[in-house]
Image (cartoon, rainbow, N blue to C red):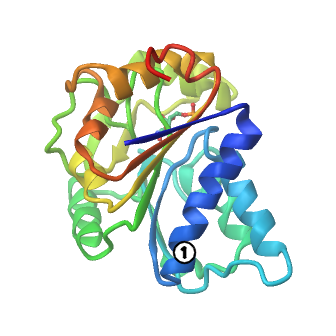
Amino acid sequence: MKVFIEKDYDALSKKAAELIKEVVKENPNAVLGLATGSSPIGTYAELIKDHQKKDGLSYAGVKTVNLDEYVGLGEGDEQSYVTFMRKNLFNYIDIDLSNTNLPNGKAVDLDKECDRYNALLATLKQDVQVLGIGSNGHIGFNEPGTSFDSVTHVVDLTENTIKDNSRLFDRIEDVPRRALTMGIKNILDAKMIIVVANGENKADAVAKAIEGEITESVPASVLQKHDNVYFVVDAKAASKLTNK
Ligand code: GLP
């Protein structure tokens, strides 16, 4: 595991974008595993900035798989993760939208949708998976207690996550209570993993993920078992690490 402690959000976003760009330069047909949430927005903004430069990197051959989606939300819904991805990345790069994939939160049969997504992931192994981290250590929407062997499944979100994510909704009652998420096994299948985290409210989760016991109570601690993980964090998110 490599840990980069950057001075602020801007610097961590630049660093994370550099790492992703390396992957795409190496393989223009790379599969990018992507995350939503506020943490990677700056990273995506850096990728867009770079793409829009003269001779910027092309994503025409890239395919993407996203971690998760709220149950009941999808295309056309402002708060859905598919909308988030378009507004924060896909609309500003030359990716073919038909090469972008998210679980479908509006699927009528959610179990079938999980099966479809797992089958898709089996054919699209992530060259790199971007992750944020929840303040309780969740990755994707894999809440504490999720099996390390889990694959794409439907989850009941914890009150903690609903509260954290409510800032992006008008009212807390509007936050969906369930989501579809890649499982931890799907995440660990990635060849490389980049975790981005900033701010004091991530400091506990970051310290536990990097230095704590590997336990299903802290989903991100499983990343210690993967042999190609990069944590790219700002000084505040790194503040509780004992070994800097
Ligand atoms: C949500 C997402 C996660 C994300 C987390 C942290 O729960 N499902 O993928 O990592 O939020 O979000 P933020 O980056 O906004 O703190």
Could you say where residue 140 lies in the image, as x and y percent from the top left?
Answer: 40, 42
Is residue 242 visible from the viewing direction of this image? yes
Judge whether 95 appears above or below 134 on screen.
Answer: below
Could you say where residue 25 lies in the image, as x and y percent from the top left?
Answer: 57, 78
Which residue sits at x=46%, y=77%? 30
Circle 1: is it few (<14), some (14-19), or many (20+) Cα within 10 Å?
A: many
Could you say where residue 2 lies in the image, as x and y percent from the top left?
Answer: 43, 42
Which residue sits at x=57%, y=29%? 174
Judge whether 181 appears above or below 214 on screen.
Answer: below
Camera-nearest residue between 233 and 116: 233
Which residue corresponds to mark 1?
A: 24
From the viewer's perspective, tell me whether residue 101 is left or right of residue 151.
right
SS class of the residue under badge 1?
A: helix
From the viewer's perspective, tell me whether residue 5 is left or right of residue 161.
right
Residue 122 in which image quadrant = bottom left
Residue 61 in which image quadrant = bottom right
